Image: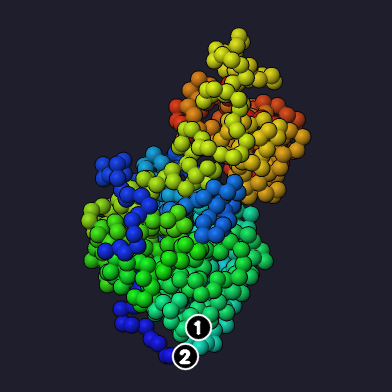
Amino acid sequence: MTNKRQPPEGGREESLSTESSEDGGGPSRRDFLKGSAAAGAVALGVGAGAIGSASAGIPTPRLHRDGNLIKDPDGNTVTLRGVNIADPKRINVTSQARGKDAVQVIDMLTDASNGWYPRMIRVPVQPVDIGEYEPGSGPPVPAFDQSQLESYLTNHLDEVVQRCAERGVYCIIDYHRHRDVQWAEGQSGPVNTVLQDEVDMFWDTVAPRYAEDTHVLYEVYNEPTEPGMWEDPTTTQWVADVWQLWLEMAQPWVDTIRSHADNLILMGSPSWSQSPEGALVEEFDGEDIAYTYHIYPGHNSSRARDWEDASRNGEGVAGVYEQAPLFVTEFGWEENAGQYIGGTDEFGDAFVEFLEKSPAIHWTAWIADPVWRPVMFDRPFAENANDSVGDPYNGTVPEVCTDLPCEWSLTTGSGAMGDDIKSALEQYRNDGIPGEGTATGTPTPTDTDSDPPTDTDTDTPTDTDTDTPTDTDTPDTPTDTPAADALVVNDYDGDPAWSSHRNDLGQWCGAGSFENGGGDVSNGALVLEYDNGGWFQEQINQSVTEYSTLVFSVSGANGGEESEVLFDMGGVRTMLSEVTDDSIGTSASDVAVDLESASVDRSSSSISVRLNFWQGGASTLEIDEIRLE
């Protein structure tokens, strides 16, 4: 094999700050940033929302690969877009300098009232933070032991994964190694077996932990560095041989994950994940595997505005997305930020246009943070926004935010990416969403082969030919017999079937992360078995201003479960016990929520009912019916 070396400008500059210190790919699938996504639509990203903030959430069923596309359980094509955050432990241990903790960052980024619409958030899990090494360093191999990893997951990652589920966004868990370690000794090997064991231990622990979380994707290894693939592997044999060596290195990690979990897997490539076209030579063995791509303004392909041609230092994708799904999990720009990440909107506009040329391309911009670079935010509360946030493991962290959360301001202008990324997420918020490819904000369901809505010529199904309420002394008070004009959201009678993910309104419904998976229907009731975990959603997707009460016909194995369930509807997010005077009993009875008293926004055309069960309890609920009166 030729001893091919990396050209001088081929590597990727580290995109983190030192915390101690013409597109040739053809026309875009859509025009970028037009109409409502103009600059006037961009709002500042302010402090993290409170518990009642409006989430921009979507259904998050388990996804699978179908050819070069990602699809939901109903066969709808899904295209996901979003952002990266910093390592959640790093955020938490520097929160007094950063201005937010990790959960508050998730809340801010999913707050629809401030115009945020990510459908996917990438969460980098860094060995340097698991093992508590100096920021900016490449930690030794192995970087941590089992107990350190368990502590990291329990104290930092679990809450972020849970919060993503609660807010209705997909979550990429990214094993974020990327510097100061080679994955193989040379282009002919041998592979780094000590590193191989470290990564295998990570996934042997993490994969089963989130196996039942349908919103979680696994990115196996952020950026394998050297030996790199510095030419096109489809035309150059020595590069193809490096890819084959990478298959030898990383296939055991895929096998470990698949021994525990069916979550979608994302695979990087040698040379800092700039060469996904290796998949055109030979793919990894296994189901539901996609490939990642990282690129920045200073790379050769970006300077040429051609992200297809892989002959330029191996940095193009060679149309790999026509064969396999492509997740561009890192890209970004910041003027005067360095040789590789420094850039302007000239790069950003062209590259986002490239990203939108195919529904097989998914993306997460790097990075929704005011410290790691290229930044999407500033810290106006800091005397000098460029100040270091310190070394939390071997030194001190300055205290510049004494009352969390503190406000972050979105970066704007030609040399900043914050406003552009936010606008793109807003523009495409209804594109490629699970459940017929539309977001919860779409008032009318698209055509579907699944069971149709209830028989009616109006958008508001009723059990009567008139919209006039039936005579009753107390129309706002539910009784054991539903009012004749009640709007039945779902009665779980099997028509449509729960497995079809359609309710009696013809809208999407689903659940996940329960002890019994996505729930089961038995004897006309939806059974949800929970043990400090689970989410449930029924979309309504129409204004319900003519209804004043939401009614659950429900029973619990223990009784009193209303104090263990979080209620989320129309901008209100609080414990169910806070919005009802009724208790869940051990036999079926009505639990009513007075929507007006609870301040639920009933006018929204994207309204849905969500429940989550991450409040520490364990029981079983049986829901016979959900209706509006």
Q: Give the crowd class for mark 2: few <14, some 14-19, many >=20 residues within 10 Å.
A: few
Which mark, by number, is residue 1?
2
SS for tag 1? helix
Q: Which residue is mark 1?
A: 241
- How far across and down, in percent of the image, does residue 437 sit? 49, 44
Amino acid of disc 1 = Asp
Camera sees residue 547: yes
- How far across and down, in percent of the image, does residue 564 sit? 63, 40
Q: Which residue is at a point 61% across and 27% down the rendered structure image? A: 454
Q: Is residue 617 above or below residue 504?
A: below
Distance from the alpha carbon under mark 1 to that under mark 2: 8 Å
Q: Which residue is at a point 66% across and 63% down the rendered structure image? A: 260
Of mark 1 and mark 2, the one earlier in the sequence is 2
In-front residue for pair 560/619: 619
In the image, taking residue 194 as reference, residue 94 lies left or right, namely left
Q: Is residue 563 above or below residue 123?
A: above
Q: Which residue is at a point 61% across and 70% down the rendered structure image? A: 285
SS for tag 2? loop
Camera sees residue 618: no
